[in-house]
Amino acid sequence: MIKLIGVSKTHITGEVQTTALDQINLEIESGEYVAITGPSGCGKSTLLGLIGLLDVPNQGEYWFDGKNVAGYSEAQLNQLRRGRIGFIFQSFNLIEELSVFENVELALEYTDTPSKDRKERVAAMLNKLGLSHRANHRPSQLSGGQQQRVAIARALVANPAILLADEPTGNLDTAHGDEVMRLLRQINAEGTTVVMVTHSPAHAAQASRTLHLLDGRIVVDALRAA
C-alpha cells in the first residue's frame, strides 16, 4: 500500500535548515497497525504528514497504491487523499458552530455521496461509536473522550483505507485514552490500516509493529511478539 524509498524532508526557516527526515525507507502493507515512536523533534509528525499526503518530500520516492506521488501537486494530492485517508489529531479539530452530526457529515461534503446516503452513513457511524444521543450537541457540550470519538467518526465515515492518528490520546485522561485505543484496535481488526504517532510505550505496544525514530531516521522497526 505504502512504500517510501530514500525519503528526506528538510524544513527551512530563515537561514536555518533542519533535516526532519533523513533517508527513510519504509513499507506499510494493507491491514497493518503501525505505531511511530521517538523523542520530540525526531520527525514522527513529519513522517505521518508525508504518509497522509499532507506534505511532499524534498528527496526520494513515495509510492501510494502503486503510484509514485512524490512530485504530485497539492491539487493532485488532495484528490488522491479524499475518501482514502482519514486523520485523527490530538486537538480534535471539531467546529464549535456545527453539531456533532454536522461535524461528521463534513467529511462527506466534498464527495459524490448523495445527501440521503450521507445522512444514513453519518447516523450509522454515530451509532457504531455510541454517539447517537449526542448527534445534536455542540463539541463544547461533550467530554474530551466524546469529542475524540466524534473526531474518529468523522475520520471513518468516508470508509478510508488508511487511518492516521497523531497522538490521539494526548489530551485525554487514562480512561478515555484507553477507550480510544480500544476503538483503534477494533477499527484495525475490521480491516483498516492504522498508523499512529504516540509517546506512550504502553499504547505503542498495542500495535502489531513499532517504528522508533531518532534524528529523522528509523532506528528500530519491530513486530510485536506473538
Image: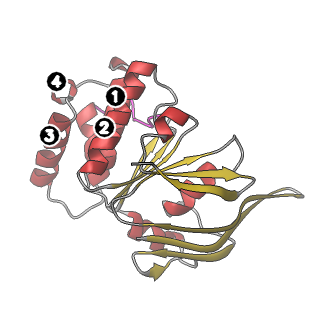
Q: Are marks 4 and 1 in contact (CB under 8 Å)?
A: no
Q: Amino acid at mark 1?
A: Glu
Which numbered disc flags the more N-terminal residue, 4 or 1?
Answer: 4
Q: Amino acid at mark 3?
A: Ala
Asked which secondary structure carries label 4, the reply is helix
The residue that disc 3 covers is 123
Which numbered disc flags the more N-terminal residue, 3 or 4?
Answer: 3
- Tell me the number on the disc at residue 179: 1
The residue that disc 4 covers is 133
From the viewer's perspective, is residue 111 above or below residue 209?
A: below
Q: CA distance from mark 4 to mark 1?
A: 18 Å
- Tell me the number on the disc at residue 183: 2
The x, y position of residue 219, in whole percent, is 67, 56
Give neighbour class at mark 1: few <14, some 14-19, many 20+ (Cα, 10 Å).
some
Asked which secondary structure carries label 1, the reply is helix
The magenta segment: 91-99
The x, y position of residue 146, in whole percent, is 32, 25
Q: Which of 98/164 is in front?
A: 164
Residue 106 seen by the camera: no
Give neighbour class at mark 4: few <14, some 14-19, many 20+ (Cα, 10 Å).
few
Q: Quadrant of residue 177?
A: top left
